[in-house]
Amino acid sequence: MSDGATTPSEGQDIDPVTLEILRNQLESVATEMGHVLIRGAYSPNIKERRDCSTALFDASGRMVAQAEHIPVHLGAMPDAVDSVLRADPKPGDVFILNDPFEGGTHLPDITLVSTIAPDDEVLGYAVSRAHHADVGGRSPGSMPPGAREIYEEGLRLPAVRLVDGGAPNEAVQDLIRANVRTPDEREADLRAQRAANARAEERIGELLEEHGSTLLEAFDAVIDYSRERVEAELDSLPDGTYRARDILEGDGVTDADIPIQVAVTVDGTAIAVDFAGTADQVAGNLNAPLSVAKSAVYFVVRAITDPDIPPNHGCYEPVSVSAPEGSVLNPRPPAAVVGGNVETSQRVMDVTLAALATAVPDVVPAGGQGTMNNLIIGDRTGEFTYYETIGGGFGARPGKDGMDGVQVGMTNTLNTPVEAMETAYPLRVERYALRPSSGGDGRYRGGLGIERTVTVETDATVSLLTERRRTAPAGIAGGADGATGENLVDGEPVPAKTSVDVEAGTTVCIRTPGGGGHGDPAQRDPAARERDRREGKVDDQ
């Protein structure tokens, strides 16, 4: 089936119409959780940029429904729920965690896992994950380039009870406040996460009253349905092993290339992704926990299969992911990992897509910008911390130009509106525009990158975690590469990964990469070229 309608697996008693209704209701609950979190949050990073994700899990820890939020958040959530299950959760419990070695992604991403127990029996879990603008550590924003240990990156929380049987755990809340630079903001954002999770329990209780035990049957049926749909999609791919290799541009400690290597094996209804040959874990913070690598792979599988398949645990069951222990994609503690979530995840996605380009050439686009362009500005007194990922070029697609100035791959956030940014922080936006000619030429043009220039109006620390500053996003099928990015402080180039203390009046400029082109440039429609010139998407020549 390819029309998006849900059909129960053989042996399920639930009828198709009821199951389709329930599937949509469950997804609506996850989406409403996200709305509550975004509306209730205090920080612009969550309220404006929507750097957060929400999902529902069943009692055994399987994802049943998710909101369409951040891929790198959602794919790692099951490991976080597994950590909570080991702590013997009870009705009324809310667990907090951010430990990347226990199902977290990086320390700024704080996860709350709440039991759903409307009748004092745990039926499932409500999960929210949000990027908090500061969780302590060596530098404002908790994303220090050049960090060598996770201890430098901020407060690390295993799965502990933030709420115990309905009673807030004041000791844990005090611990968090004492270790972050903006405690009031953190407390407000955590309240928004708790409210989002509480809304899920309320809505599931209503659905239970409406549908009774059929609701729990639907958990299994929806997961089975998604698995069968994904298996059918994989079965249509040509069997074989497909390989690719790419690099990261240094780890913030050295500029040495870090190879990422993959072998993707399609075998009937299953797909195995093996990162043997990938670099050993590095001294800097581009190490990515295996949960992050799995997130990137899951995203790719979703990207090459039918997007109408309901996203849940069933989509993951046919997929296996392995990486050597002690490698940059499966590091041992206390490795620094904050950049692995935002930058290494992008490269894992890139290299996995590149491997599959041979299997599904009509689906895989040219290389996108391949970075989140992380910009962090804050002062050491704790007055403010600004964090943003900046969009860039999407790779050209078979039959279509790439998109300009968008978030690509493992992130799915918005930008911070100029008005909100200048209101909340001592920052002034001088320029915010597309970069002409940054998209790779081709029969179909790669998307354009962005230039964003900001004046810092107080003494502050500026941190950058970026990629694709010397290796361009690749064109495909004869298309040209996209432009590399560039970072400037007061007009002078600075490294891709750096942290600098600046004085009031300093200007920071981020020029993000463009996307690669697709197909022979000689075959580009002359009318499309004229339109590019007319719209200022290419420099006058």
Image (cartoon, grey):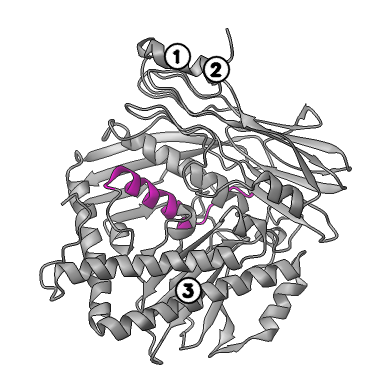
Q: Are marks 1 and 2 in contact (CB under 8 Å)?
A: yes
Residue 294 is covered by the magenta coloring? yes
Q: Amino acid at mark 3?
A: Ser
Nearest-to-viewer mark from 2 and 3: 2
Q: Amino acid at mark 1?
A: Arg
Q: Quadrant of the C terminus?
A: top right
Element type at mark 3: helix
Instruction: Residue 414: give x, y in percent of width and height.
Output: 56, 48
Q: Amino acid at mark 2?
A: Val
Q: Quadrant of residue 314?
A: bottom left
Residue of label 3: 83
Q: Decide if residue 78 is in sight here.
A: no
Residue 114 higher or lower than 153, as above or below: below
State the count of labels: 3
Element type at mark 1: helix
The answer to whether residue 265 is left or right of residue 371 is: left
Lower sequence index among marks 1 and 2 = 1
Disc number placed over residue 538 in the picture, else none = 2
Instruction: Residue 113: give x, y in percent of width and height.
Output: 50, 75
Instruction: Residue 30: give x, y in percent of width and height.
Output: 42, 67
Nearest-to-viewer mark from 3 and 1: 1
Residues drawn in magenta: 284-306
Residue of label 1: 529
Element type at mark 2: loop
- For image coordinates 37% across by 52% down, the residue present is 298
Check disc 1: other Cα within 10 Å, few if <14, some if 14-19, many if 20+: some
Q: CA distance from mark 1 to mark 2?
A: 9 Å
Q: CA distance from mark 2 to mark 3?
A: 50 Å
Residue 316 is covered by the magenta coloring? no
